[in-house]
Amino acid sequence: MYVKSEEVNEVNFLASAKYRNFTRQFSPDGVTANAKGRKIIKAGTVYRNSNGVAIGLVFKDVDVTEGKQPGAVMYEGWVLAARLPETISAEDKATMTGIHFKDEYEEQEPAEDDSEQTELQG
């Protein structure tokens, strides 16, 4: 008996158990085939609407080798930016208002202290 074993690695980029996904149709247009000839849209890739605006993240890998396929797009939730397949631009982050980046949130710098306002409160 012949058995072919294949290893699949999908990095977990979720930072919380609460998220909101919607089903979208994925096209193979512009997707480059991998070494095995498969056209895979990686989980964590920015998803753009028909106007080219970033509106979410691909939730799970989507194989579009055989043509258009349905898949989940995350519209709301907390993610770990360091685990995403590519760095997301500031412009894309600004349009994905429901996606929160936990690692960036935790690394925030303190707000500049306005000494006059501090004196008024004290």
Image (tube, rainbow, N blue to C red):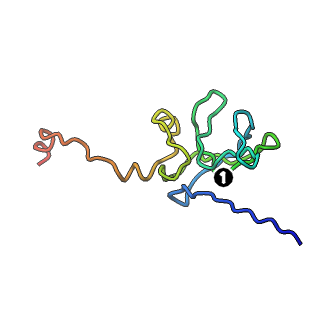
On the image, the x and y values in percent for residue 122 come to: 11, 49
Give SS at disc 1: loop
User: In the image, what residue type sits under mark 1?
Assistant: Lys
Of residues 18 and 39, which is closer to you in this image?
A: 39
- At x 69%, y 62%, the residue is 7
Mark 1 Cα-neighbour bin, 10 Å: few <14, some 14–19, many ≥20: some
- At x 63%, y 27%, the residue is 51
On the image, the x and y values in percent for residue 58 come to: 63, 46
Residue 50 position by quadrant: top right
Of residues 8 and 1, which is closer to you in this image?
A: 1
Q: Residue furthest right?
A: 1
- At x 68%, y 60%, the residue is 8
Residue 1 position by quadrant: bottom right
Q: Using residue 19 as the reference point, say whether residue 1 is left or right of it.
A: right
The tally of labels here is: 1
Q: Using residue 49 as the reference point, say whether residue 94 is left or right of it.
A: left
- At x 57%, y 35%, the residue is 54
Q: Using residue 105 as the reference point, say whether residue 87 is left or right of it.
A: right
On the image, the x and y values in percent for residue 67 come to: 81, 40
Q: Residue furthest bottom?
A: 1
From what the image shows, is residue 43 above or below residue 12? Answer: above
On the image, the x and y values in percent for residue 33 come to: 72, 42
Q: Which residue is mark 1?
A: 60
